[in-house]
Amino acid sequence: MSKLQLYDVIIVGGSYAGLSAAMTLGRAKRYVLVIDDNNPCNRQTPHSHNLITHDGEPPAEIRRKALEQVMRYDTVSFYDGTAIAVNNRQTYFETHTSQGDVFSSKKIIFTTGVTDIMPSIKGFAECWGISVLHCPYCHGYEVKDTPLAVIANEKMAYEYSRLIHHWSKDLKLFTNGKSTLAEEQTAALRSHGIEIIEDEITELQHKGGELKQLIVKSGKAYPLTAVFAKAPFTQHCTIPQQLGCELNEQGLIRVDDFQHTNVHGIFAAGDNSTLFRSVGVVIAAGIKAGAMANHQLIEEEFR
Ligand SMILES: Cc1cc2nc3c(=O)[nH]c(=O)nc-3n(C[C@H](O)[C@H](O)[C@H](O)COP(=O)(O)OP(=O)(O)OC[C@H]3O[C@@H](n4cnc5c(N)ncnc54)[C@H](O)[C@@H]3O)c2cc1C
């Protein structure tokens, strides 16, 4: 396909949300270019769970199959690279890549995900997605009824501990500094046998990402199978913000129920616009974004 071609839709981000949008648009006979540099947030996790038909498969294998199926649609093209800038020319968008290519499209969908920011605790990043887990629906079953910990403080600590306690009664809460829990929350957690440890965490000792023990500043070691922790995140790609797309108070791209951003012609789907991070959820959002981009094109074409 020529670089001068005006695509119907360019999709920036070709992981689960992006490929789902691409399939929807390919099946709607739309000329689509998917631009992706293959850096999904779950790349370190050995097995992805809680997606029927793919339960327990390596994440890269799910993406490989998705890409293979999407590329069967001859109106869909794939570009292996990074989008670095997009100009909104009002009637079309011009997307520039780090390799110096420029592509044009009538609509654009951002399915660019988020970047999790690893804390400076030694071993945390190496265990991320293996034995430092963020979501019990994705990974709780595999570690159920084993010695677990939650690393959290402030607002989230109570709710998160209560949630993880459902998967294992052998649970500790590490606040990694002075606890900010309310007295009644502390009492409620203790009444369920959850020990609250305020010592600073110095290290997660592990073997190949499999947690062995958590070490605190006093030197005390706590043998654990896994810890649950949420990492702060930022948008993986800031082009939507540069184009005037609003973020909400959680740092997610603000979209309506149909994945429209506040800028006409620009859609967003997947982790970049939902807190409900799960492959199944973002696949559904990708379908909506694809269908709604097609819908907007039809509104403009059928007059
Ligand atoms: C450690 C971990 C484990 C998880 N385990 C599970 C699980 O077991 N089950 C489950 O259902 N969910 C799991 N999740 C959640 C799931 O991985 C995400 O919800 C899902 O990957 C989000 O898909 P996405 O397409 O929105 O973004 P991502 O999968 O993060 O993909 C974004 C893509 O956009 C690309 N991109 C970004 N910017 C650009 C750019 N400028 N140019 C080109 N390409 C760009 C990236 O390289 C990447 O390929 C896990 C998440 C994490 C972090």
Image (cartoon, rainbow, N blue to C red):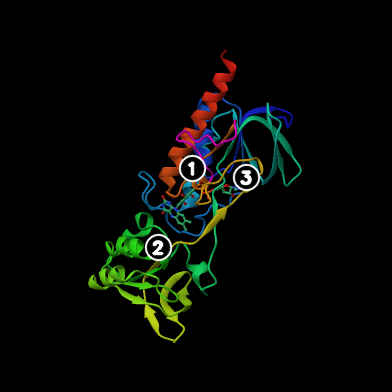
Marks 2 and 3, Cα distance to the nearest angstrom?
A: 28 Å
Which of disc 1 and disc 2 is earlier in sequence? 1
- Dot 3, crowdedness within 10 Å: few (<14), some or many (≥20)? few
Marks 2 and 1, Cα distance to the nearest angstrom?
A: 39 Å
Give the amino acid type for the residue marked by disc 3 in the picture: Gln
Magenta highlight range? 253-264
- In percent of width and height, residue 81 lies at 67, 46
Give the amino acid type for the residue marked by disc 2 in the picture: Lys
Tell whether label 3 touches label 2 (CB within 8 Å): no
Residue 262 is a magenta residue: yes
Is the N terminus in the top left, top right, bottom left or bottom right quadrant?
A: top right
| Residue that badge 1 annotates | 65
Tell whether label 1 touches label 2 (CB within 8 Å): no
- Considering every residue shown, the one lying at the far right of the view is 100
Q: Is residue 226 above or below residue 163?
A: below
| Residue that badge 2 annotates | 155
Give the amino acid type for the residue marked by disc 1 in the picture: Lys
Residue 201 is a magenta residue: no
Is the C terminus in the top left, top right, bottom left or bottom right quadrant?
A: top right
Q: In terms of secondary structure, what is the magenta stretch mainly?
A: loop
- Dot 2, crowdedness within 10 Å: few (<14), some or many (≥20)? few
Q: Tag 2's secondary structure? A: helix
Q: Nearer the viewer, mark 3 or mark 1?
A: 3
Tell whether label 1 touches label 3 (CB within 8 Å): no
| Residue that badge 3 annotates | 241
Q: Foreground residue, 290 or 194?
A: 194
Instruction: Left or right? Give the position of 187 relative to 47.
Output: left
Q: Tag 1's secondary structure? A: helix
